[in-house]
Image (spheres, rainbow, N blue to C red):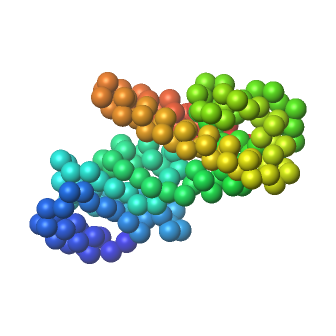
């Protein structure tokens, strides 16, 4: 972890008065607990009036916990990588669209989602595309996953502005982590 080096690095970077600050090296194989420990020990040394960018962290539950710890921006390949493997995000967790149970499922990926994919295609059609290795399956899954992430970030912003982030976090984590297939 090198706590002393992270502290010194943060303090030295703040002296340069950048427009934003990044925390990196926390999502390349480390476990969740170690990642959160690095955030917690680095965050106090970063200015509160500048954006804080957490590099490479992208599971929805990790983003929410990182926001709670003061992080503002994120980037990650997870939405597209998971889409390529047929894993789709929704409010209750992750779904593997290639599972047999979706073969004749006429519902959209998420009935409450307004993305192009959910408004126009059924789970069974996307299941067929993914199982057939049709590129359209990956495209539609990617559209959905990216929309999910955009919507998640919008909900986080509103929850913060409306002073209900803790409630939002608890509800999301209770629902999202409960059902993965």
Q: Is residue 87 left or right of residue 33?
A: right
Q: Nearer the viewer, residue 138 or 65?
A: 138
Q: Nearer the viewer, residue 80 or 93?
A: 80
Relative image position of residue 95 (x, y in whole percent): 71, 41
Residue pictured at 77% horizontal, 40% vertical: 126
Q: Is residue 135 visible?
A: yes
Relative image position of residue 156 (x, y in whole percent): 40, 35
Q: What quarter of the picture does the N terminus occupy?
A: bottom left
Q: Is residue 122 above or below residue 95?
A: above
Residue pictured at 59% horizontal, 33% vertical: 115
Q: What quarter of the picture does the C terminus occupy?
A: top right
Q: Is residue 101 left or right of residue 69?
A: right
Q: Is residue 57 visible?
A: no
Q: Is residue 117 above or below residue 56?
A: above
Q: Is residue 53 above or below residue 174?
A: below
* Count of numbered circles on the image: 0
Relative image position of residue 23 (x, y in whole percent): 34, 62
Relative image position of residue 177 (x, y in whole percent): 60, 40
Residue sticking out furthest to the left = 15
Residue pictured at 33% horizontal, 32% vertical: 160
Q: Is residue 133 above or below residue 151?
A: below
Residue pictured at 49% horizontal, 35% vertical: 151
């Amino acid at each position: 972890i090198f706590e002393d080096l992270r502290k010194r690095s943060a303090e030295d970077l703040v002296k340069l008065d950048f427009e934003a600050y990044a925390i990196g090296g926390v999502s390349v194989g480390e476990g969740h607990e170690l990642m959160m420990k690095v955030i917690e020990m680095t965050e106090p040394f970063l200015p509160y009036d500048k954006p804080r960018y957490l590099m490479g962290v992208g599971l929805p539950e990790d983003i929410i916990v990182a926001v709670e710890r003061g992080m503002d921006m994120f980037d990650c390949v997870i939405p597209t990588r998971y889409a390529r493997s047929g894993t789709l995000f929704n409010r209750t967790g992750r779904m593997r669209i290639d599972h047999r149970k979706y073969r004749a499922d006429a519902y959209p990926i998420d009935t409450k989602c307004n993305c192009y994919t959910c408004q126009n295609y059924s789970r069974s059609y996307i299941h067929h595309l993914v199982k057939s290795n049709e590129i359209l399956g990956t495209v539609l899954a990617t559209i959905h996953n990216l929309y999910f992430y955009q919507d998640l970030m919008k909900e986080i912003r509103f929850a913060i502005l409306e002073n209900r982030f803790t409630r939002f976090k608890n509800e999301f984590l209770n629902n999202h982590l409960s059902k993965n297939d």
